[in-house]
Image (tube, rainbow, N blue to C red):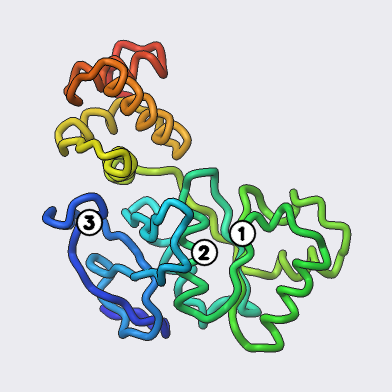
Amino acid sequence: MRRSISMRCGVRSRRAVSASSKGQGCCAYRARPRRPAADDMTRQFALPFAAAGPDGDSEFLVTAANRAAIDRLFDWTRLPFGAAVLIGPTGSGKTVIGRAFAAGSGGDFIDNADGESDEALFHAWNRAQTQGLPVLFAASTPPGEWGIKLPDLLSRLGASLLIEIPPPDEEMTQLLLQKLLARAGLALPDGLAHYAALRTERSYPAIRDLARTIDEMALAMQRPIGQRLVREALVKLAGTDGSPTD
């Protein structure tokens, strides 16, 4: 089944953290403008270098947890008034998703929109209407919590498509943990990643805290990552005995 979006997609079936691994219902989006859309299970957008994050990250993971939200967002030809608001916690991928959106659609991406002035937000909205290109606003909370003073602006943002990034599922937890540790040069085998995913809180900040703790402990102890180290990291963070949270 093909999507009805105008952005073309590069197709590769791979896990974001291992070029040799086979996809298991997850794909990494990268923005690649003007290619034919591909199957949901294998598509991956390639971001231009300038659109990558400060750490060079140009991919965001997609699993069953966030696939519906991503599909709605990237079907930008159907956005009401050509505008959308993407909300989610720190570390949920809003910035990379937004850059992919802008690179693929040719529209605007306003990151940390809750910190922008009313005038700047209104200008971005009006520019989208004038140019006929979509605009995406990203923040941690909905527009009603941004402290907007202009009623007309609040009304327009309220008419935009509001998309919330859901909490991570087990697969997202596992893959993101592997991706974060891979950035630090540490390989986390699938079995250990699955072990950790069953035992950590299902939230993006918690996943990042666990990756940071594993990295710090592996460095301090000069030990390879094994089940004992992962269990100790879980205990250190949560004060639990490392039992599954499910």
Image x and y of residue 91, in percent: 48, 44
Which amino acid type corresponds to the residue marked 1 in the rendered image? Asp
Q: Residue at x 54, y 49 (%)?
A: 88
Q: Residues within 10 Å of mark 3 (few under 14, many from 20)?
A: some
- Residue position marked by numbered label 2 in the rendering: 98
> Which dot marks residue 111?
1
Q: Residue at x 54, y 43 (%)?
A: 90
Helix, strand or loop under label 2: helix
- Residue position marked by numbered label 3 in the rendering: 25
Residue 113 occupies which quadrant of the picture? bottom right
Q: Residue at x 73, y 52 (%)?
A: 115
Q: Residue furthest bottom?
A: 131
Image x and y of residue 238, in percent: 41, 17
Gap in angstroms between the C-alphas marked 3 and 1: 29 Å
Which amino acid type corresponds to the residue marked 2 in the rendered image? Gly
Q: Residues within 10 Å of mark 1 (few under 14, many from 20)?
A: some
Q: Residue at x 59, y 68 (%)?
A: 109
User: 61 and 33: which one is in front?
Assistant: 33
Gap in angstroms between the C-alphas marked 2 and 1: 7 Å
Residue 104 occupies which quadrant of the picture? bottom left
* Vertical relation: 33 (above or below) 23: below
Image x and y of residue 136, in percent: 59, 68
* Vertical relation: 117 (above or below) 227: below
Q: Residues within 10 Å of mark 2 (few under 14, many from 20)?
A: many
Contact flag, marks 2 and 1 (Cβ < 8 Å): yes
Helix, strand or loop under label 3: loop
